[in-house]
Amino acid sequence: MKNTSFDIDKTVLELVMSDDSAKKQQLAKNIFEIAHKQGAYPASIHDFYIARGKGAFSGFTVPAINLRSMTYDLARRIFKVAKKNNSGAFIFEIARSEIGYTGQSPLEYSSMVMAAAIKENYSGPVFIQGDHFQVNATKFKENPDKETEALRALISDAVHSGFYNIDIDSSTVVDLSKPTLKEQQFLNYDICAKLTHFIREIQPEGVTVSVGGEIGEIGHKNSTPEDLRAFMTGLNDKLPQGLIGISKISVQTGTTHGGVVLPDGSVAQINLDFNTLKTLSQVARKEFRLAGAVQHGASTLPPEAFNKFPQCETAEVHLATEFQNMIYESRHFPANLKAKIYEWLKINAANEAKQGETEEQFLYKTRKKALGPFKKEIASLPQGARDAVAAEVEGKFEFLFKQLGVVDKRVLVDRYVRAGFSS
């Protein structure tokens, strides 16, 4: 059903520009109601992933896409590509850190996504995910209860905003100084178990939120099958009997978030260990009936790497920085605004500069931090400029959907995913 009386573009701009929380909530409510009437609804990918873990299907990798800026415009392009390729297996996500520096609350983010579904006349399940809902190791060490409560509050906010997929990242508290793998992973699986239990208590009736765990902090040592087994055994022991656990596991195979920046501002080639990824996915499925392993920090990989993820039976791959890069580097992104942002960074992010790094490295590393402060200016750019930038990124989405093998997967999604409506 195509909605013709609702000015979705105007509503989206109002939502982004308003600082009134009550007004934002009302605008979001309007968006969700229209989306539901159209047949688009936030959903959990849990049952789909569990079916994969049982061997019901294979041969593709679900893209999980972080939208740090131009969220509405880029989400429209994702839905457009999904319709064109008859795909239903794709995820919109935002991390705990991104929520902060992009100035996008869970409700604002999910509303932008559902508004895009309305605009593109998309119907069916929409997967919105909390990526890297991460334990801050320093804060946890200082006050474990306070940090855990902060995560509970974030999870609650997200779930009530239509995030029916939550990735818990407590890998930051893995203690490699401990003598055994189980002791090293103890805090990781203990926190993950407690937060999974909490999610099951607050999830809407009829919805099983998809929960992910993580065993290797991205940018650190590669994960092993032994790490995975120690974590999963401990997690399953900690979860109350009969409680539904996680559906996937994030691992480390050699990537870093945002990539490694060279002095000229370009990104170094990543040495990703696909054999490790394949082995961990096999262990996750065969021994624990999970969908498989999840790869983070992959968007800046060379193009020829992406078709290897389905070959390794990777369950999900997280993609973020490259889309941000494409926005900043687009010839359609106003040069005067980019210059303004860079000058702002030189003052407001000066404390992040490291001795010996070039200005190009500094700006590449910090420019994500300007997306929140300049969110309204970017959202207010002329429609033509935003459309031109989004069209360039659309080509990347099209490429990824094909390389990751999610073309013509809508039938599988419809078979295994149940409707879930946020209140």
Image: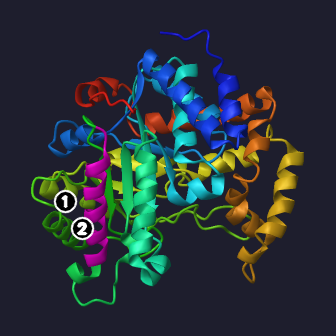
Taking the magenta stretch, the answer to whether it contains residue 193 is yes
Residue in front for this viewpoint, 386 or 402: 386
Q: Amino acid at mark 2?
A: Leu
Q: Position of residue 100 (x, y in %)?
A: 60, 58
Q: Is residue 251 magenta?
A: no
Front residue of this view, candidates 136 and 396: 136
Q: Is residue 388 left or right of residue 234?
A: right
Q: Residue at left 30%, top 46%?
A: 210
Would residue 385 appear left or right of 147 to someone viewing this image? right
Q: Quadrant of residue 278?
A: bottom left
| Residue name at image x 36 percent, y 25 percent | 408
Using the rendered view, name the quadrant where residue 283 is placed.
Answer: bottom left
Dot 2 corresponds to which residue?
228
Dividing the picture into quarters, in which one does residue 76 lie? top right
Q: Which residues are magenta?
A: 186-204
Q: Earlier in the sequence, mark 1 or mark 2?
A: 2
Q: Position of residue 264 (x, y in %)?
A: 75, 66
Tell me where residue 59 appears, x and y as whole percent: 28, 39
Disc 2 is placed on an element classified as: helix
Main SS of the magenta segment? helix
Q: Amino acid at mark 1?
A: Val
Q: Residues within 10 Å of mark 2 (few under 14, many from 20)?
A: many
Do the CB atoms of the residues marked 1 and 2 lie less than 8 Å apart?
A: yes
**Tag 1 residue:** 283
Is residue 216 visible to the viewer in this orientation of the structure? yes
Q: Position of residue 83 (x, y in %)?
A: 47, 21
Residue lying at the far left of the rendered structure = 241
Figure check: 4 above or below 178: above
